[in-house]
Amino acid sequence: TTVQYRLTTVGPAQHWFAAEAETMVAAFDGAEFRNRAVLGDCRRYAAESKISFAGEEPAAAPKPGAPAPSKPGRLRKNLLVDITVDQDLDFATATADTALRATLAEPLQDGDQVIAPAGAKVTMRLLELARVAKPVDRYELVLRLESLEHNAAPLPLSAKLLNTGTAPGLIKQERRLMPAFQKKRADRFSLLARESNSEQTVLYWEARQPRVRKGFRMRWLTDSAE
């Protein structure tokens, strides 16, 4: 089990909080299981009281502290951006530096504040597309999340890929590869994952199914500076 801590601003001070936790389990039959949790949206709750006497006008008490909402044009870290791709991407005709249309599958929220509703338009960009023959014939897609339509204007997005839904041809990526010798061998195969960041993320696709189909789901975490 691995726990990563991050310095987080809560109220007027910063504290170290667990931000990510990952547990890897290897069974005796060679099967491996991975559980990953991402924590965020820490809040500070406070209350104040004041005694006043007759003849005194009590001053209005400040409201309890709450996390500052995202400022216009700027999003906090670790906000979930859940999107659905709105168009097919055919690798035979696609070129690098191509914009891809998508929409929010779920509202983008910062605590109780809804920044953008489900259905808001999102733009991704295909930065690179290459076919690689070894160790398995595949396509490598380099993608970046770029912007979100917010109040009729594009809001820049800087985000890291968290996970994806399943799709025909999508090759599973693993943090580490440990071959398991079993009587039943799966037809599917995996590749070692490449590190994802806010600049780009890499997906691997089988060459025999060279297309990302409309409806492919992707989940990202914002990576903007606080």
Image: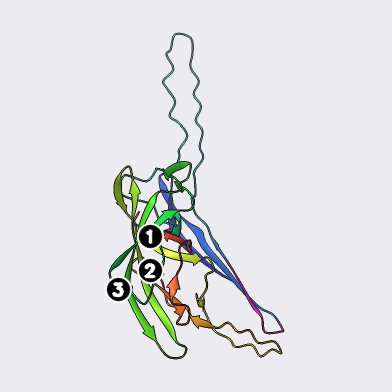
The mark nearer the N terminus, 2 or 3, is 3
- Residue 192, percent across and down? 48, 82
Q: SS for tag 3? A: loop
Q: Nearer the viewer, mark 2 or mark 3?
A: 3
Residue at (65, 87) in percent of width and height: 185
The mark nearer the N terminus, 2 or 1, is 2
**Residue 193 falls inside the magenta stretch:** no
Numbered circle sitting on residue 197:
2
Mark 2 and mark 1 residues within 8 Å of each other at the beta carbon: yes
Q: Which amino acid does label 2 sit on?
A: Asn
What color scheme is it? Answer: rainbow
Q: Is residue 71 above or below residue 84?
A: above
The mark nearer the N terminus, 1 or 3, is 3
> What are the residue bounds of the magenta stretch?
28-35
Q: Name the residue under label 3.
A: 95
Q: What residue type is labelled 3?
A: Thr
Q: In this view, does 49 lie above or below 30?
A: above
**C-alpha span from label 2 to label 1:** 8 Å
- Residue 218, percent across and down? 47, 62
Q: Which of marks 1 and 3 is in front?
A: 3
* For residue 23, side relative to residue 201 (left or right): right
Q: SS for tag 1? A: loop
- Residue 203, percent across and down? 43, 74
Numbered circle sitting on residue 223:
1
